[in-house]
């Protein structure tokens, strides 16, 4: 059997030791007991960044001085910018001065807590008054909370809410009067006016119908669009209460159109035109149609018979849709190619009755924003912002900017660019800049009693007494020190948990040592005292005592649905996993197999055909096993130009001594599992509901209960109903893969390929 070099395994472990952990460094203590230090944290899919903090050792007060823009939201109604990252939520004032923490909202400086992995989605009302977010009560469920920034009161909207890290839990109406939330495959409305007057009906009365957050869209005039089956409904927000009250006997909303497919919110998406007369429908993520909303389709249609259509590659999906009032549509797609993210822009002018989307030549674009007057579009690239006329696509200028992350227009001639080093307001057409805040410091210290910071291009100072910021001409900080007349500061390593170390204070006048803050985190899972025997010929788990290591294995049998989400999620967390590919999957999806290989994952064999090898109607000989493994090797090589790893398992994980021995003679190691995710279980069978069926959120919780150090957790690529006709799943585990990975990281687990897990167990 081929073995990775031991040095390679050690380097791999070293590269993963810090994933998700927060470390503190670079202490600067002034003579008057003011302390500067930075925290370094990782984020999925983006670069590691540092955040600068300021502490007063006398009062114990902490302040955050830099604000990395993991997420931003420009509140047009108030003129404020909101920044969210794993250290908290922050807002500027309307003058766009440096942000401050949202009062009484969870943050590092208030509770000593830092989020690990992907952040929970935060939804802010368009008027900026309310924040909606989930507070976990278990690994996959939480409470939906409504925080009023004016009254600083916190209310529970709903309990037992499924947690999603990729889909917002609610959608606000444009006028901030309502929001819709989903739970358990059902949709509910919430009226702010009824809530304020204490007349809000119970949740059961506020039911709108079945569906998920992908089933609804708010129109420009605060009317709600809702697709159920093949029918498109429109509900005026003033009708929500009456419609929900009579929902058992009266269909919710007014039917405004029909689509020729039954809408599946797990895989389909739609977008409504500004006028509300058309929809763009994405079927299965790749078939893009434009439909006119028309109620009566019994007779011939006055609309063109040849409607616009776009077929996307299977490795792509729509990321952003811009639809102007002039009926010009711009799509930005994202996907994976050769292990890297790729983006493509498509456009169509529906006023011209065009029937095809045009692919644009712009490369490197990973984000876009339309100006408020819809005259210009800003294209986000790694080196800066390209400004184009939206109607003609003519380039009007380029704004150089190092490592931008987000772009958002504030006015027709002004936009905010938030990047890896700073967040800036840019005025057009001259391109004049005003720095709103630094995202992270490159250098910092004390200078003439003030805090001084230097980014890549910007130097600023902060006066702790007045809490005022000012530009800085000369950056000449005092030499760094860790001691004042009253205190000495140092870093102390922590044995476990997401914080690698903590800032400690030693009092020199009153003997005593204590932490600057108390880190708040969930404890890591304990390591068992005794190991379990490990079989390296039938490898079902690794060592239980040599670290919190687990392997996620993905079995690709025939269906390709969900593979793009799996590969993208693994890439975001920089995780290399093990895939087992069946010959039928290779023959049906050679491009998908190539993408798995190019993404750097370990690929083993799932035999060249998929059947129950213990079925008495088949004669399975040792020679048949050897030929089947060899044939799968050849087909994989033809598809990828690479060799399979000498790891395999039988279809359905069937075990029989002669089968295992035949594969062993081919130098193959059988890889079993000790945690079956059960994501392959469909809801209905001929006997009724399958006794093992669980929703995806419950599958996440079950896996987290069963996993141990050394576990091998198996998943199935695709839709299980594709091979089990007549049944279905209501949702899919790959939609919660990022949540599962985040929870594993929070418990201290490292996710490794099977071959690495084996080497770590020897």
Image: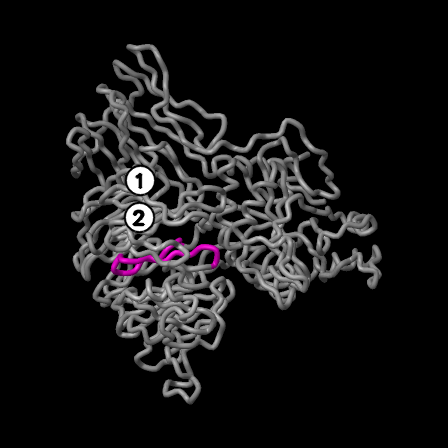
Which residue extends farthest bottom? 300
In the shown orientation, is residue 563 left or right of residue 2?
left
Please state which of residues 720 and 349 is positioned toward the viewer in this rendering. Answer: 720
Q: Which mark is residue 105?
A: 1
Residue ID at (24%, 35%) = 453
Counting from the top left corner in percent of width and height, residue 192 is at: 28, 54
Specify the quadrant of the image occupied by residue 246.
bottom left
Q: Which mark is residue 629?
A: none
In the shown orientation, is residue 53 left or right of residue 630?
left
**Labels 1 & 2 near each other (Cβ < 8 A):** yes
SS assignment at label 1: loop
SS assignment at label 2: strand
Judge the density around disc 1: few (<14), some (14-19), many (≥20) Cα neighbours within 10 Å. some
Specify the quadrant of the image occupied by residue 205.
bottom left
Q: Which mark is residue 131?
A: 2
Magenta highlight range:
168-185
Counting from the top left corner in percent of width and height, residue 328 is at: 31, 73
Residue 574, above or below 221: above
Residue ID at (69%, 45%) = 2
């Amino acid at each position: 059997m081929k073995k990775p070099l031991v040095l390679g395994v050690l380097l791999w472990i070293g590269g993963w030791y810090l994933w998700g952990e927060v470390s503190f460094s670079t202490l600067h203590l002034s003579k008057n007991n003011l302390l500067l230090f930075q925290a370094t944290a990782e984020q999925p899919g983006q670069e590691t960044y540092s955040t600068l903090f300021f502490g007063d050792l006398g009062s114990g007060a902490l302040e955050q001085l830099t604000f990395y823009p993991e997420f931003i939201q420009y509140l047009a109604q108030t003129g404020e910018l909101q920044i969210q990252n794993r250290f908290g939520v922050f807002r500027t004032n309307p003058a766009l001065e440096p942000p401050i923490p949202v009062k009484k909202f969870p943050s590092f400086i208030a509770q000593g807590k830092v989020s690990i992995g992907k952040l929970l989605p935060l939804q802010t009302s368009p008027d900026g008054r309310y924040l909606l977010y989930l507070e976990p009560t278990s690994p996959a469920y939480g409470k939906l909370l409504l925080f009023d920034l004016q009254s600083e009161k916190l209310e529970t909207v709903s309990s037992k809410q499924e947690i999603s890290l990729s889909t917002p839990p609610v959608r606000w109406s444009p006028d901030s009067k309502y929001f819709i939330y989903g739970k358990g495959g059902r949709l509910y409305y919430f009226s702010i006016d009824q809530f304020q007057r204490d007349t809000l009906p119970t949740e059961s009365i506020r039911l709108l119908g079945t569906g998920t957050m992908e089933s609804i869209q708010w129109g420009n005039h605060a009317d709600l669009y809702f697709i159920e089956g093949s029918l498109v409904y429109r509900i005026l927000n003033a009708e929500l209460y009456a419609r929900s009250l009579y929902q058992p006997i009266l269909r919710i909303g007014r039917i405004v159109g029909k689509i020729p497919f039954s809408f599946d919110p797990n895989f389909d998406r739609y977008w409504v035109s500004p006028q509300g007369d058309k929809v763009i429908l994405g079927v299965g993520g790749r078939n893009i149609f434009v439909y006119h909303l028309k109620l009566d389709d019994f007779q011939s249609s006055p609309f063109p018979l040849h409607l616009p259509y776009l077929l996307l590659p299977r490795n792509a999906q729509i990321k952003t849709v811009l639809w102007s009032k002039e009926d010009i549509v711009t799509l930005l797609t994202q996907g994976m190619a050769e292990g890297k993210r790729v983006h493509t822009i498509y456009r169509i002018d529906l006023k011209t009755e065009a029937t095809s989307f045009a692919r644009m030549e712009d490369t490197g674009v990973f984000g876009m924003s339309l100006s408020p007057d819809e005259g210009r579009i800003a294209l986000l690239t790694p080196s800066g912002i390209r400004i184009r006329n939206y109607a003609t696509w003519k380039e009007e200028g380029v704004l150089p900017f190092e490592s931008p992350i987000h772009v958002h227009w504030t006015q027709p001639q002004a936009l905010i660019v938030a990047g890896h080093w700073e967040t800036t307001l840019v005025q057009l057409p001259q391109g004049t800049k005003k720095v709103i805040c630094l995202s992270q410091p490159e250098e910092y210290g004390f200078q003439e009693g003030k805090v001084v910071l230097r980014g890549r291009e910007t130097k600023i100072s902060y006066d702790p007494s007045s809490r005022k910021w000012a530009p800085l001409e000369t950056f000449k900080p005092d030499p760094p020190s860790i001691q004042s007349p009253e205190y000495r500061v140092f870093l102390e390593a922590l044995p476990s948990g997401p914080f690698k170390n903590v800032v400690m204070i030693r009092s020199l006048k009153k003997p005593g040592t204590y932490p600057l803050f108390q880190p708040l985190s969930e404890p890591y899972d304990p390591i068992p005292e005794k190991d379990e025997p490990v079989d390296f010929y039938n490898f079902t788990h690794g060592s239980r005592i040599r670290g919190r290591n687990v392997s996620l294995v993905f079995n690709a049998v025939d269906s390709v649905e969900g593979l793009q989400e799996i590969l993208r999620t693994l890439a975001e967390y920089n995780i290399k996993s093990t895939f087992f590919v069946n010959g039928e999957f290779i023959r049906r999806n050679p491009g998908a197999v190539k993408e798995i290989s190019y993404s750097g994952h370990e690929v083993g064999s799932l035999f060249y055909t998929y059947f129950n090898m213990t079925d008495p109607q088949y004669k399975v000989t040792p020679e048949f096993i050897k030929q089947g493994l060899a044939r799968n090797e050849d087909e994989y090589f033809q598809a990828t130009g690479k060799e399979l790893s000498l790891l395999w398992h039988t279809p359905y994980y069937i075990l029989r001594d002669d089968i295992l021995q035949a594969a062993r003679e081919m130098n193959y190691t059988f890889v079993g599992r000790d945690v079956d995710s059960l994501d392959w279980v469909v809801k209905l069978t001929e006997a009724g509901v399958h006794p093992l069926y669980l929703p995806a959120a419950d599958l996440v919780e079950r896996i987290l209960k069963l996993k141990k150090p050394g576990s091998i957790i198996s998943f199935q690529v695709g839709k299980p109903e594709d091979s089990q006709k007549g049944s279905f799943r209501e949702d899919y585990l790959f939609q919660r893969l990022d949540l599962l990975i985040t929870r594993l990281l929070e418990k201290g687990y490292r996710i490794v390929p099977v071959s690495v897990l084996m080497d770590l167990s020897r």
